[in-house]
Amino acid sequence: MGQEHVREYLLPRREEAVQSHNNDLSPVQIAYLKQKAAFVLPKRVYHYSKLMGVSPTGIKITAAATRWGSCSPQNSLCFSCRVMLLPEETVDSIIVHELAHIRVKNHSADFYQEVEAYLPDYQDRIAPLRKFRTGHAASTPSISY
Ligand SMILES: [Zn+2]
């Protein structure tokens, strides 16, 4: 109950929050999302890294508005705390996407084969991301991740 109450109280409606510009989320909302992300994401990353047999070197949480996640050349993963505003199955698809970059550092057919080996319904899972192309991300073909 506590968590849900805080969520309702602090956050704008899910879609408004994700569709809006970076500055439309208050520092308090960002802090809340970061805290939540730091609690939720490492567990999900651990689950999928075991499953996929890869080992990220670190996990970083940012407030980035145009990028859901990234994987550094050193295999350190980075996620925007905004992923906490997405459905769980979409969050998992972002996690698997970044973990797949540990093996394949591009978006080739091999890359998507790797992703879909673990999430056959990957394309359905990321569908909600398409409607979130606004703000900075609207000027680019897609939100990068
Ligand atoms: Zn990618």
Image (cartoon, rainbow, N blue to C red):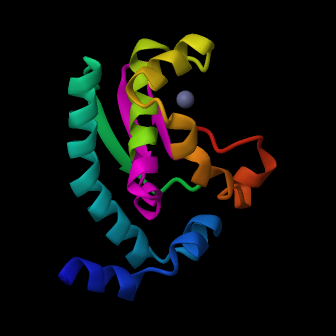
9 relative to 7, above or below = below
| Quarter residue 98 falls in | top left
For the point 77% across and 43% down, the residue is 140
Q: Position of residue 62 (x, y in %)?
A: 42, 52
Left or right: residue 141 compared with residue 145: right
93 relative to 138, above or below = above
| Quarter residue 108 falls in | top right
* Numbered range of the magenta stretch: 66-91
| Quarter residue 102 falls in | top left
107 relative to 66, above or below = above
For the point 51% across and 35% down, the residue is 122
Quadrant location of ligand 1?
top right
In this orientation, does residue 105 appear? no
> As drawn, which residue projects farthest toward the right?
139
Left or right: residue 75 compared with residue 125: left
Q: In the depicted view, which residue is nearer to us: 97 or 117?
A: 117
Q: Position of residue 17 (x, y in %)?
A: 55, 72
> Which of the image's four quarters has the C terminus?
top right
Q: Position of residue 29 (x, y in %)?
A: 41, 75
Left or right: residue 17 compared with residue 118: right
In this orientation, does residue 30 appear? yes
28 relative to 40, above or below = below
Residue 116 colored in magenta in the image: no
Q: Position of residue 65 (x, y in %)?
A: 57, 56
Residue 79 colored in magenta in the image: yes
For the point 44% across and 58% down, the residue is 87
For the point 48% across and 41% down, the residue is 69
Number of numbered discs: 0
> Which of the image's four quarters has the N terminus?
bottom left
